[in-house]
Amino acid sequence: MATAPDSAAPGEAGHRSAGTGGAPGAGARPVGTVQIVDHALQVLKAIAEADRPRGVRELSRDLAISKSSVQRILVSLEHEGLAVADETRKYVIGPAALTLAWKHTANSDLVGAASGTASRIAAMTGETACVSTVVDGRRVTVYEAESPQPLRLITGVGRPYSLFSGATGRVLLSMLPDERVDQLVREHTGAGGEPKSGSGSESGAESGSGAESESVVRARIDAVREQGYAISHQEWIPGGCGVAVPIGTQGSIVAALSIYGPDARLTDQRTAELVPVLRAAAAEITVRWRQPA
C-alpha cells in the first residue's frame, strides 16, 4: 500500500496531507503544514471512515506513523471526545465529531443555498434529492432530502462513495481540473491504464466498478462534460437509478445536485423529463451560492 503524503487539489473540499495507506490523492505534503497536526488529522479521518474499530498497530501500519505517535494522538482525541476506545482498546469516532458536523452544516454556504431547493425537488419528484461534493477523492453528500415514498434510496450525509460509480460521481469528476481527473483516473484504473479491481470506497460504502479501462472511464467523463448531466442504472445499488447535474464551483469546492430512486419509478422517460427540472433547480442554487448560473 502506498504511504506517500498527498497534497490538496483544486476543485476539492479538503485535502489529505500525508499518506493514509493508499488513499486517493497521494502526493507531497503541502509546504507550511505541521506534521503532528497532519498525523492527528490522518488518524481522526482513518477511524471516522472505517467500518469497524481500529487499533494502534493497524493504524500505525496503514498510515506509516510510529505506534508511539498514534497512541499519543488517540489519547488526545479520546480526551477531547473525538475518539472512543472499546474494551479491546480499538477506536471508533467519538460523539464530539457530531458537533463538528453540525457546525459545518449550519455554517456551510452550499448547504444554506441548496437545502430549500433540494427539499422542494424531493417533494416534487417523490425521490431523494442530494447535494454532493468531493472530499479526498471521493464523493460525499452534504445535504439530503429523503423521498417521502416507503421504498426509497438514501446516501447518508457525510458517507464517502467512489467517484467512479454512479451519476453523481461522474458529474463531480467532470467538474474537476484536468490534472486532478488524470490523477484520480490513474489511481482508479492502475498506473498502466488497465482495469484495477477493488478500487472502491475505503469505508466499504461502495465497491466501485473497478473493472473499466482508463479509456472507458475518460469517455464517460467527457460525455458528461458534453451533455451536462449523467444518469446511472444499478451502478452502486441493485435496482437503483440516479440522475445528476452540476451546480457549480466556488473556490475549491465543486457541487452537484442529484436525485435517487428505484428504477421501477425512474424509467428512461421519467429521467429524461427530470433532467431539465434538475438543471433549473441547480441554476437556482448556483445563484444563491453566488456563482454564475
Image (cartoon, rainbow, N blue to C red):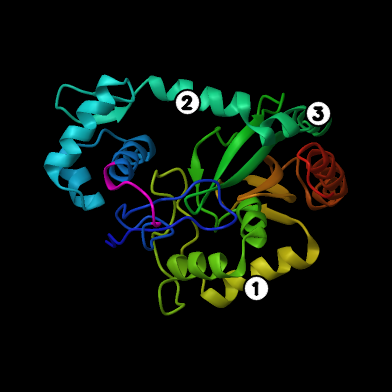
Q: Name the residue beneath numbered marker 3.
A: 120
Q: In the depicted view, which residue is nearer to us: 286 or 230?
A: 286
Residue 84 visible in the shown view: no
Q: Residues within 10 Å of mark 3 (few under 14, many from 20)?
A: some
Q: How far apart are labels 3 and 1 at the CA level?
A: 33 Å
N-terminal label among 3 and 1: 3
Q: Name the residue beneath numbered marker 1.
A: 219
Instruction: Please state which amino acid type lies under the numbered disc 1.
Output: Ala
Q: Secondary structure at mark 3?
A: helix
Q: Secondary structure at mark 2?
A: helix
Question: For the point 63% across and 58% down, which residue is it?
Answer: 170
Q: Is residue 144 magenta?
A: no
Q: Residue furthest front?
A: 32
Residue 234: x and y in percent read: 61, 51
Q: In the depicted view, which residue is nearer to us: 68 or 192?
A: 68
Instruction: Please state which amino acid type lies under the numbered disc 3.
Output: Arg
Question: For the point 15% across and 47% down, which residue is it?
Answer: 66
Residue 107 visible in the shown view: yes
Q: Residues within 10 Å of mark 2 (few under 14, many from 20)?
A: few
Residue 13: x and y in percent read: 55, 46
